[in-house]
Amino acid sequence: MRRSLALTAAALTVSAATILAPAPTTYGSTGATSGAVPACSGTHWISAWYAAPGDALLSQPPVEQTLRIQVRPLASGTSARFRLSNRFGMGPVTFGHATVGLQATGAAIQAGTLHTVTFGGSPKVTVPQGQDIVSDPVPITVKRFQRLLVSVHVVGSPGPATQHGISEQTTWQTAPLTGNHTAQLGAQGFFATPLLKAAPTLPQSIPYLTGVDVTAPKATGAVVTMGDSITDGTEAEVVPFLLSKDNIDQFVSYPDQLANRISSAGLPFSVANAAISGNMLLKNSPIPIFGPAGLSRFGLDALDRSGATTVILLEGTNDIGMYGASRDAMVAGYTQAIEAAHARGLRILIGTLTPMAGTLQPPFYGALAEPTRVAINAWIRGQKLADGIVDFDKAVRDPAQPARILPAYDGGDHLHFSAAGYKAMAAAVPLASLKRATC
């Protein structure tokens, strides 16, 4: 369901009835608990990469040009399919051609790896306003952590692009009016894509591409991480939107580093990161790129991920820090998410909220929100509704000052984390609590 693109200062509280049904999705073609690995045969689709879309209002509208998007898949597979979204567009968008290949360096593609991506057998597709589309299967061998480059030619001037607005990775584009360069292997003519045309130093965005699924053994499940910038992997935001660049293209978010742990342990899981920076659990953000309320997008962005078995929910910092949400309101929101996950047969782990004392973020983070954070964390640690918890707070706090992040883990603004901090968060996830796929 498409929400208004207008900036609104009054964000609405999400009620129990507003975990939304999936937005219309067009398919190009048809396509256990912890312990011993189940004896499964065959393959199924699992989410290997995800970038939850926020809105389109602040995006740089493409004009007859090619976009090249970097993907670091968190699962291996023998074929792949690609998800494009026009969920927040202002009209239909036509993709004239799309390709995928293995990344060489930067925006360059390895020779001999390029594949055309089709939709219902056609290289060209028009996606109506408010809808998503999934490609036909592409016969490309995907290896975990081996980066892909997905290129799409945007026909004409469709208006602002649905996007994942603040990312920690580079996306490239050609100049407007240069047409279709999806088959080009070299990086010539591609340049990094800023969030806003007028402010090229702002963070990168990920336009249109929201997901990559791969065919993997049926014993493989997807762990979906749901949250805000702390899950998205932002390092530091000393001044809003002026982020540290240390983590760009380093893929050190806690979900990325959780995938590293899972791979090292030889466990049959992918990780799909459904976080949106600035997102809140209970309210739509008045800033469009921060996305609809976590609860309102929980079904579409988390529960609907291909092969999902477990959700890790870490969200609420912005609710209590920006809008002063109460402990009881947050508990009601967590309870709603838990019930929705269980109704779909998924396991859900709730994360404790991390420290934020001393943050430079306006207006209410830190001291004013601290009593609420402590009360919420006490409830999370004591409740029995979820299938488990991840004590992120304990993993990253300074033992001498529990309201603050341990200095070695602080990303610089006392709210977000360094690569070491995100590694500590990943280490806090109890791998034995992840639900294995069943056949």
Image: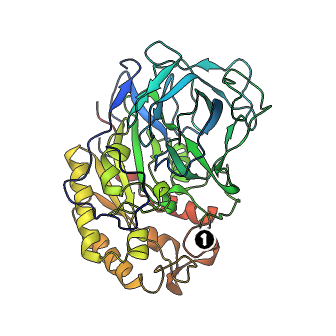
> Residue at coordinates 66% horizontally, 24% vertically from top-left?
182
Q: Is residue 101 in view?
A: yes
- Image quadrant occupied by the C terminus: top left
Q: In the displayed structure, would residue 237 be above or below residue 120?
A: below
Lateral position of residue 51 relative to residue 179, left or right: left
Extreme top residue here? 121
Q: Colour scheme in the image?
A: rainbow
Estimate the x, y position of residue 231 in percent, counting from the top left: 49, 58
Q: In the displayed structure, would residue 126 be above or below residue 231?
A: above
Q: Secondary structure at mark 1?
A: helix
- Image quadrant occupied by the N terminus: top left
Q: In the displayed structure, would residue 360 be above or below residue 297?
A: below
> Residue at coordinates 41% horizontally, 20% vertically from top-left?
28
In the image shown, does 263 or 58 lie closer to the viewer? 58
Lateral position of residue 352 relative to residue 22, left or right: right
Q: Residues within 10 Å of mark 1 (few under 14, many from 20)?
A: many
Figure quadrant of residue 308: top left
Estimate the x, y position of residue 181 in percent, counting from the top left: 69, 24
In the image shown, does 424 or 231 lie closer to the viewer? 231
Q: Which residue is identified by label 1?
A: 409
Q: In the displayed structure, would residue 146 be above or below residue 179?
A: below
> Residue at coordinates 41% horizontally, 81% vertically from top-left?
369
Q: Is residue 147 in view?
A: no
> Residue at coordinates 43% horizontally, 27% vertically from top-left?
134
Extreme right residue here? 188
Estimate the x, y position of residue 359 in percent, counting from the top left: 55, 79
Lateral position of residue 155 relative to residue 41, left or right: right
Q: How many marks?
A: 1
Q: Amino acid at mark 1?
A: Tyr
In the image shown, does 206 or 7 lie closer to the viewer? 7
Estimate the x, y position of residue 438 in percent, counting from the top left: 29, 35
